[in-house]
Amino acid sequence: SRRSDVGEPLYLTPLIQSGDITTAQDLARVTDPLPGTESTPMESYSGFITVDEAFDSNTFFWFFPAQVDPAEAPVVIWLQGGPGSSSLFGLLELHGPIITRFDENGDTVGTVNEYTWAKKANMLYIDNPVGSGYSYTKTSGLPTSQEDVAIDLYEFLIQWFTMFPQYQANEFYAFGESYGGKWVPTIAKKIHDENPTADLKINLAGIGIGDGFMSPPETAVYGDYLYQ
């Protein structure tokens, strides 16, 4: 059935900053069965991390630990394109552990995705940048460059790995599609630049881009080439 009351937003940054990561994880744990998956218990965590207090910039995430050996599995973030599309599209329509559809009554129902990437990867879906999906900010806090996006996303990742320290040593991959062709290499470069002096180092192992929107001037001539 439809649910209109989802409660209050969960802001995790105060708990992360105070070092109370056990409470942060406990509160972020999604306890209600996902629609259509009542018979298949599924561990996941969700909430908001504040990436810029001055602009009230808050990034939403939904995390699914790997179904097989999460302690050793890589951490993979998924960044949707757009720009401005929610990464929940990737979660609920592409490679998440559940795929959603509408039933004959117009209610959202889910089915377990047997081909989910979460079988062998710790999947972290992030509404990026702020202003996309459930992530929000003041108008003055909206990013105006790739560098702005990378600064916010890097701050999110540092806090997230602080909240989930058991994954800090795991290989880390940034994946995305479409305009993610810009988000992905930009955050990878940001991590590469920050790691040498960072207290918390992210174990960057690689990136993946699907149908990437990377260089519009070059892409513009692909049509003539493909038509030949």
Image (spheres, rainbow, N blue to C red):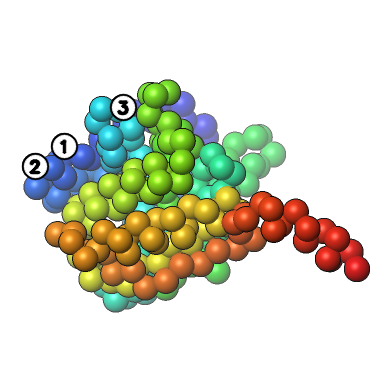
Q: Residue furthest right?
A: 228
> Residue sitting at 26 percent across and 27 percent down?
54
Q: Residue furthest front?
A: 217
The answer to whether the residues at label 1 and label 3 have Cβ atoms under 8 Å apart is: no
> Residue sitting at 39 percent across and 41 percent down?
148
The answer to which of 138 and 104 lies nearer the viewer is 138
Residue matched to label 3? 55
Dot 1 crowding, Cα within 10 Å, few <14, some 14–19, many 20+: few
The answer to whether the residues at label 2 and label 1 have Cβ atoms under 8 Å apart is: yes
Can residue 152 be seen from the camera position used here?
yes
The answer to which of 142 and 105 lies nearer the viewer is 142
**From the viewer's perspective, is residue 151 above or below residue 169?**
above
Sequence-wise first label, 1 or 3: 1
**Whole-percent x, y for residue 143 in the image:** 43, 36
Residue matched to label 2? 18
Mark 1–mark 3 Cα distance, whole angstroms, equals 16 Å
- In which image quadrant can residue 178 be found? bottom right
Dot 2 crowding, Cα within 10 Å, few <14, some 14–19, many 20+: few
The answer to which of 226 and 87 lies nearer the viewer is 226
Residue 14: which numbered mark, if any? 1
Sequence-wise first label, 3 or 2: 2
SS type, badge 3: helix
Mark 2–mark 1 Cα distance, whole angstroms, equals 6 Å
Question: What amino acid type should be assigned to the residue bearing mark 2?
Answer: Ser
**From the viewer's perspective, is residue 16 above or below residue 98?**
above
**Whole-percent x, y for residue 167 in the image:** 25, 65
Instruction: Mark 1 vs mark 3: give the one in front.
Output: 3
Question: What amino acid type should be assigned to the residue bearing mark 3?
Answer: Phe
The answer to whether the residues at label 3 and label 2 have Cβ atoms under 8 Å apart is: no
